[in-house]
Amino acid sequence: MSYLVKNYNRKKLSFKKGKGSFLYSTDGSKYLDFVQGIAVNSLGHSHPKLVKAIIKQSRRLWHVSNSFTIPEGEELARKLAKKTFADFVMFQNSGAEATEAAIKVARRYFYSIGKPHKNKIICIKNSFHGRTLAAIFASGSKKMIEGFGPKIEGFDHFDFGDHKKLKKLIKKDTAAIMVETIMGEGGIKVIPDWCLRGLRDLCDKNKILLILDEVQCGVGRTGDFFAFEKSKVKPDIVPIAKGIGGGFPIGAVLMSRKVASGMIPGTHGSTFGGNPLAMKIANEVMNIISNKSFLKNVKKNSQYLINSLQKIKMRFPKVIKEIRGRGYLIGIQLHVNQNNFIKALMKNKLLTIRAAENVVRILPPLNVKKNEIDQALKIISKVCFNYR
Ligand SMILES: *Cc1c(COP(=O)(O)O)cnc(C)c1O
């Protein structure tokens, strides 16, 4: 009997230990973990440097109020600003909080320049921005909002790729366009670079803001620090979370000087957001991931993984429909049932997770070893072979 609310359909499997790319189950099995807490454990389980950082900081100081200056947070904000488009950073504790805060920043900016009527956000239908009330209504997913009315106003939707509808939706009351650079939960759908540039132009022309949700695809996941980097587009607001804490719950909103000007004292806050313990760990993650050769390695090895998956797809065209994604944010779209496929992988000691559109997500840690990739490829091939 479990006293947990049944809002998850949990597997029986549980774990007692994690190390790098591997998880050790309570029943004595060793699994290659290509879920990594859904792109959260960016450096794998129990990375020695993160273990050291958490022990050191926990002896020193865990939490103080944001009414004081927190040097560890100042340091991380400086690092993020130096590394990215951002001029300023605001810390939260999760992805949903970060996207909510991104929406607040956009609205508050227009309010602060005397245009409070500009408050609508345009989003992609069936996207994912988290589970808070505003975020589920931003997602435009029927399933997520079912039973959670009354409707939260202020979000308009267009279908992925429907440029005509998007242009039509932009009106006098529009504040921003908010999209995931790569739709994660939605099935690993990549917005192409030329599209991102189109979005930026559209926003500039209409004097509205561009919010790129990089909660899942950001922080090195694609081999660039941000998934949008390759497009050379400069967004106004970027929420991040998952990977930046390496397993510790942290969220953040990165933004330009212009939009940050609306966030004066008292406009937003978070009791836990940016506390010394969280910041110390994220600083350590940042030190490792922002290293050029680290990201170069992510690019190289992930390209090998994707190329190899393409080859498996060619061998088993009746099982695999498409390989999607970039870097270590990969989707295998199947012809066969995704749940059965995931179960078969699990039986062979490889953990993966579903996404929409019958996609199996492959999310190795960013520091996954080449031989671990080969191990996963072998299991995927074997499972595909068994479908013949
Ligand atoms: C996971 C995710 C969120 C929500 O993050 P939580 O930490 O679960 O609140 C928001 N946006 C995207 C793109 C995500 O993948």
Image: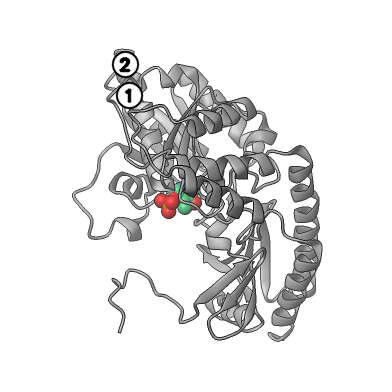
Residue 341 in picture, x, y percent from top left: 60, 78
Label 2 lies in ligand 1 vicinity (Cβ under 8 Å): no
- Residue topped by disc 2: 112
Left or right, 241 with reference to 196: left
- Residue topped by disc 1: 108
Label 1 lies in ligand 1 vicinity (Cβ under 8 Å): no
Marks 1/2: CA–CA distance? 6 Å
169 shown above or below 334: above
Q: Tell me the SS state at disc 2.
A: helix
Residue depicted at x 57% and y 56%:
39
Which quadrant holds the N terminus? Answer: bottom left
Q: Disc 1, disc 2: CB below 8 Å? A: yes
User: Toward the viewer: 191 or 247?
Assistant: 247
Residue depicted at x 65% and y 56%:
48
Q: Is residue 208 visible?
A: yes
User: Toward the viewer: 236 or 266?
Assistant: 266
Q: Tell me the SS state at disc 1.
A: helix
Residue 14 in picture, x, y percent from top left: 49, 77
Q: Is residue 127 visible?
A: no
How crowded is the residue under tag 2: few (<14 C-alpha within 10 Å), some, or many (20+)? some
User: Toward the viewer: 375 or 121?
Assistant: 375
134 shown above or below 353: above
